[in-house]
Amino acid sequence: MKEKFCIVAQGGGILTAYHAGVISTLKELNAVDKIDHIIASSGAATIYSYLVSKQEHLIEPIWECLMSSGKFINPLKHPLGKNILDIDFLIDTIKTKYSLNIKKLKNSPTKLEIGLTNVINGKPVFLSNKSSVDFFELIRATCAVPYFYGKSVCINGNHYYDGTIGSVCGIEQVTGEKNILLVLTRPQKPLRKMAILRKIISELLISNETEELQQTIWSMVKRYNNIANVINKLSKNKHIVVIQPKNKLPVFRIDNRLDRVKRTIRQGYYDTINSKELKGFLNNLN
């Protein structure tokens, strides 16, 4: 029996357009059928949902629709950015215009785990495509960025925010998998703490959140900078290949520039297709 592999896909709002290019390469390399498990949060969860439902041809058109609509991101809606990210428009789009096939998604042999962050305690929670919850609400919750979306999402009586807050890349969710493809949307260089911005963000963006959630948010930089250590530890008994940009992507986490999104997709493709480590990784699965 041929070996399979797991994809761990980091979120990051509009940065997740990078994953569209990664998926294009995996299709080109005939590697999609070798995927048996995907762990994703935020925008990455939406993108890989279309891969699991075998509708990956819709991924790039969705980005074009969202960016050109003027509804998904509206920087003129509030001078400080409050509620400028319309996740409800995203959900309407994947429900109707680019209808996500929920039946195929749930019946797929590929397990898709989607990360959420508990609003009260700041802890990560992962729910899969096999669960009984409304999948569209699951996507709404994993993309619910505090302040910029403006509200949490209730699932089974619990309220959730963007999954990237509780788990910056999802790597800790990996358990029995032996072969891991980790796709990060930020370059390897450490993130800065930005002490000055911390006070501004605390006062303007998250002052009404629980202390536990605020602490989780402030620990994100430290946890992201620790990813390399986590990888080294896991690599002792797992085969891990990392795909990530060498420099900052052309887009920001919240960005409505279609040309920059297209460049980000292309970069995801070129970074993946030119990875010698990935080709060796895939060859070892045969």
Image (tube, helix red, strand yellow):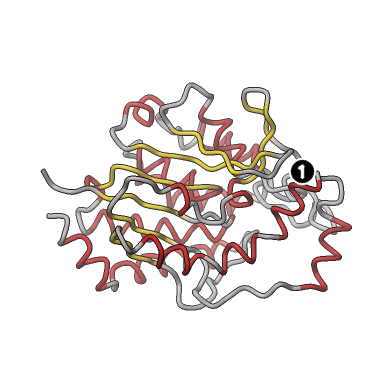
- SS of the residue under disc 1: loop
- Residue occupying the point 38% across, 27% down: 106
Residue 270 place in picture, x, y as percent: 34, 71
Instruction: Tell me the quarter of the image containing the N terminus.
Output: top left
Residue 213 place in picture, x, y as percent: 74, 47
Residue at the spot of label 1? 150
- Residue occupying the point 32% across, 63% down: 236
Q: Is residue 284 left or right of residue 113?
A: left
Front residue of this view, candidates 200 and 252: 200
Residue furthest to the right in view is: 203
Task: Answer with the quarter of the image where residue 258 lies.
Answer: bottom right
Residue 279 place in picture, x, y as percent: 21, 66
- Under mark 1, the amino acid is Gly
Residue 110 vs 261, above or below: the answer is above
Tell how many labels: 1
Q: Is residue 118 left or right of residue 67?
A: right
Q: Is residue 197 left or right of residue 219?
A: right
How many neighbours does mark 1 have within 10 angstroms: few (below 14), some (14-19), or many (20 or more)? some
- Residue occupying the point 17% across, 55% down: 285
Front residue of this view, candidates 165 and 238: 238
Residue 59 vs 103, above or below: the answer is below
Residue 137 vs 216, above or below: the answer is above
Residue 241 place in picture, x, y as percent: 33, 65
Task: Answer with the quarter of the image where residue 223 lies.
Answer: bottom right
Instruction: Tell me the quarter of the image containing the C terminus.
Output: bottom left
- Residue occupying the point 52% across, 68% down: 186
Front residue of this view, candidates 34 and 14: 34
